[in-house]
Structures are given as C-alpha cells and as structure tokens.
Image: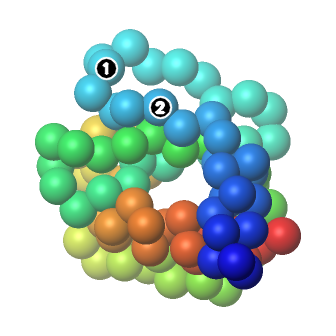
Amino acid sequence: MALFRGLLGAKRIIGLSAAATSKKTVSAPKGFLAVYVGEDQVQKKRYVVPISYLSQPSFQALLCKSEEEFGFDHPMGGLTIPCPEDTFISVTSRFQ
C-alpha cells in the first residue's frame, strides 16, 4: 500500500510527463526543469520536475550518472538521465 501511495505522489509531482519522440520542444514552466529519462536511446520519456529536486542528494546522484555517460553532449538536446523510468519515479517519489 505504501508503494502505491508513493507512486501516486510521483504521478502528481511528475504529472507533466510526455513521450520524448516528438521533435517539437516545449518549454518547462518557470521553476521547473525538463529531463529525459530512460536507458534506451529511442524510448526516452520527458519529465518536468521542480528545480528544488536539484538540491536532493539522490537526484544529484542521477545527474552524476548522466554526466559520466554523456558529459555535456546530450543526444536529446536536453538533460538526459540514463536510468530505468521506474527507478527515476522511485527516487523522485521520496522527495515529498
């Protein structure tokens, strides 16, 4: 039951998810950051997350993984986090 509540919280916070297959770029609202999540180069999903996540140690760990893999050359044109989508949701659902 706790896992279910955590997932609902993650959906509420990250509810602005969209498939990253479109080439059309949509700006993130003020106070938010767009990231692309996924391990497969083709099947990444775009999430819009609050910039407050940047101060969270576990989110910083995801960013370090991204830096190790991509440096400053992100193939999606935006910040790409190379982890499974369920891992990303699990990590970010704890920020509430």
88 lies above or below 46: below
Give residue 75's quadrant in the image. top left
Q: Residue at x 23, y 62 (%)?
A: 39
Question: Is there any visible trace of residue 67 in the rendered image?
Answer: no
Name the residue beneath numbered marker 1: 22
Q: Look at the image and tell me in which quarter the N terminus lies.
A: bottom right
Q: Nearer the viewer, residue 49 or 13?
A: 13
Left or right, 76 with reference to 80: left
Instruction: Please name the amino acid that badge 1 sits on.
Output: Ser
Name the residue beneath numbered marker 2: 18
Give residue 4's quadrant in the image. bottom right
Disc 2 packing (10 Å; few <14; some 14–19; many ≥20): few
Q: CA distance from mark 2 to mark 1?
A: 9 Å
Q: Residue at x 66, y 85 (%)?
A: 57
Q: Which structural element holds mark 1?
A: loop
Q: Residue at x 70, y 57 (%)?
A: 8
Q: Position of residue 10 (x, y in %)?
A: 67, 59
Q: Position of residue 20 (x, y in %)?
A: 35, 33
38 lies above or below 2: above
Q: Look at the image and tell me in which quarter the C terminus lies.
A: bottom right
Q: How many marks?
A: 2
Residues under numbered marks 2 and 1 in contact, where contact means CB atoms less than 8 Å apart = yes
Give residue 66's quadrant in the image. bottom left
Question: Given the current orientation, which residue lies at the most extreme top position?
Answer: 24
86 lies above or below 31: below
Disc 1 packing (10 Å; few <14; some 14–19; many ≥20): few
Instruction: Please name the amino acid that badge 2 sits on.
Output: Ala
Q: Which structural element holds mark 2?
A: strand
Instruction: Name the image colouring.
Output: rainbow
